[in-house]
């Protein structure tokens, strides 16, 4: 607080400079405020990037799906972490993290798609490298969890491979895991660390609501997918049907029985994985034989191995909708019946929720 100057008292030059600076600052603030209030002089504001709680969030990826990682990083407004991933002449993998991660909350995105073992090894080596670089928390983000279909002993002396993969990830140094649409939800119990299980249904439901198919029936191609199809049908407010397939004899092909009314209706076949597309095409044929007027299909993971793309191209399916958990081959990208939806926003929001220690389940409310 300034004191009143007495008559004849000398003025301190320091106080004069301080007062002048304060007056100038006040003038500047008033001018700036006035300029903001005038819409004619204010330039158009750019939409700010999505903020985050601190700068310790880092996202890395292997060689399996860098395009999806770049989409996620763009959504979050952060750069992709720098790594070096090469191979020695004998085929061994070499991984090096090229930036400081000490104390950071690190997410490593890598679907374990074809070649499965190579991509899995990359992921394990990256987790180990990050652990030895003193990352505070390491979360593998696995859009497609390979070996998920080997989740039980279906024959004597056979392994439970999905449990082994879970143990490998934990031993390598993972603190938690973020996985999209597991083939069997109980695989979460194979992990001894927290698992956040994401579903691609919000993305798929949003797309098919826009299509507004008349008299829609959601179809499960087998008994194992009934729960998934029932959830989807409830979200779409549509009917539900099931295709029961069975082999009547060792030398005879499968017989498909449609359970539910599909006559005169549009049918949407829902599955989590499209591998060779054999079951998918047989299901479509069975639905059309039962009187369906239109058949489309959707799945989260487009594995599309072997003759899958050729089968889809020659099938009566009008459209096959998949997500980008797995990158398509060139033949898949050129197939007009296949449409790809991005789940980058869904994964990005889940990463942000985990980083900020908020609820992930709210994404599916």
Image: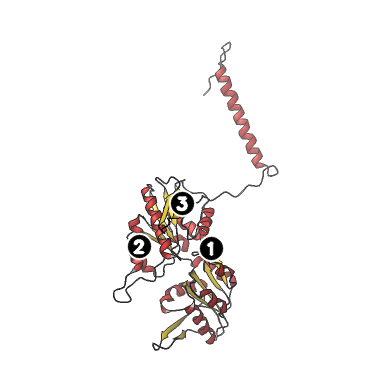
**Quarter occupied by residue 338:** bottom right
Picture coordinates of residue 87, whole percent (x, y): 44, 56
For this orientation, the residue located farthest to the right is 40
Splitting the image into 4 quarters, where does residue 90 fall? bottom left
Give the mark nearer the N terminus: 1 vs 3: 3
| Residue found at the very far left of the displayed protein | 157
Answer left or right for 138 relative to 10. left
* Disc 1: which residue: 342
Q: Residues within 10 Å of mark 2 (few under 14, many from 20)?
A: many
> Quick check: 100 above or below 350?
above
Q: Nearer the viewer, residue 325 or 260?
A: 325
Mark 1 against mark 3, which lies toward the viewer?
A: 3
Residue 84's label in the rendered image is 3
Give the number of the disc on residue 323: none
Query: Which mark sits nearer the N-terminus, 1 or 2?
Result: 2
Residue 25 in view in this figure: yes
Residue 331's place in the image compared with 87, above or below, is below
Q: Are marks 1 and 2 in contact (CB under 8 Å)?
A: no
Judge by depth and name the residue closer to the eye, 7 or 210: 210
Identify the residue at image location x=53%, y=58%: 67
Disc 3, SS = strand
Percent from the top left, x then y, of residue 333? 57, 67
Residue 243 x %, y %:
46, 82
Q: Which residue is mark 2?
A: 166
Image coordinates for residue 292, horizontal then vertical, percent: 55, 83
Q: Is residue 81 above or below residue 23?
A: below
Around disc 1, counting alpha carbons within 10 Å, would you say few (fewer than 14), some (14 to 19), or many (20 or more)?
some
In this orientation, does residue 365 appear?
no
Dot 3 or dot 2: first in sequence order is 3
Q: Disc 2 on helix, strand or loop? A: helix
């Amino acid at each position: 607080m300034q004191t009143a100057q007495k008559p004849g008292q000398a003025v301190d030059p320091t106080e004069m400079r301080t007062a002048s600076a304060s007056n100038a600052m006040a003038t500047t603030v008033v001018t700036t405020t006035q300029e903001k209030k005038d819409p004619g002089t204010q330039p158009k504001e750019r939409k700010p990037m999505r903020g985050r709680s601190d700068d310790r969030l880092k996202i890395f990826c292997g060689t399996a799906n860098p395009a999806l990682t770049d989409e996620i990083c763009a959504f979050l407004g952060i750069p992709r972490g720098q790594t070096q991933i090469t191979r020695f002449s004998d085929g061994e993998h070499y991984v090096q993290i090229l930036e400081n991660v000490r104390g950071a909350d690190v997410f490593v995105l890598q679907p374990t798609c074809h070649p499965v073992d190579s991509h899995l090894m990359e992921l394990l080596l990256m987790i180990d490298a990050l652990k030895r670089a003193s990352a505070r928390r390491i979360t593998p983000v696995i859009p497609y969890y390979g070996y998920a279909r080997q989740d039980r002993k279906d024959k004597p002396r056979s392994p439970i491979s999905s449990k082994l993969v879970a143990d490998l990830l934990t031993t390598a140094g993972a603190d938690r895991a973020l996985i999209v649409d597991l083939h069997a939800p109980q695989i979460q119990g194979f992990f001894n660390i927290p698992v956040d299980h994401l579903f691609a249904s919000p993305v798929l439901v949003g797309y098919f609501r826009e299509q507004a198919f008349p008299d829609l029936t959601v179809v499960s191609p087998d008994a194992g997918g009934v729960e998934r199809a029932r959830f989807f049908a409830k979200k779409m407010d549509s009917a539900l049907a099931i295709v029961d397939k069975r082999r009547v004899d060792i030398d005879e092909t499968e017989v498909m029985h449609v359970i539910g009314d599909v006559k005169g209706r549009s049918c949407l076949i829902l599955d989590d994985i499209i591998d060779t597309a054999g079951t998918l095409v047989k299901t479509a044929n069975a639905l059309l034989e039962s009187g369906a007027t239109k058949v489309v299909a959707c799945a989260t993971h487009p594995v599309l191995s072997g003759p899958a793309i050729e089968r889809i191209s020659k099938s009566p399916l009008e459209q096959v909708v998949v997500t980008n958990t797995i990158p398509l081959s060139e033949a898949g990208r050129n197939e007009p019946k296949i449409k790809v939806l991005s789940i980058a926003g869904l994964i990005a929001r889940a990463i942000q929720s985990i980083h900020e220690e908020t609820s992930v389940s709210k994404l599916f409310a």
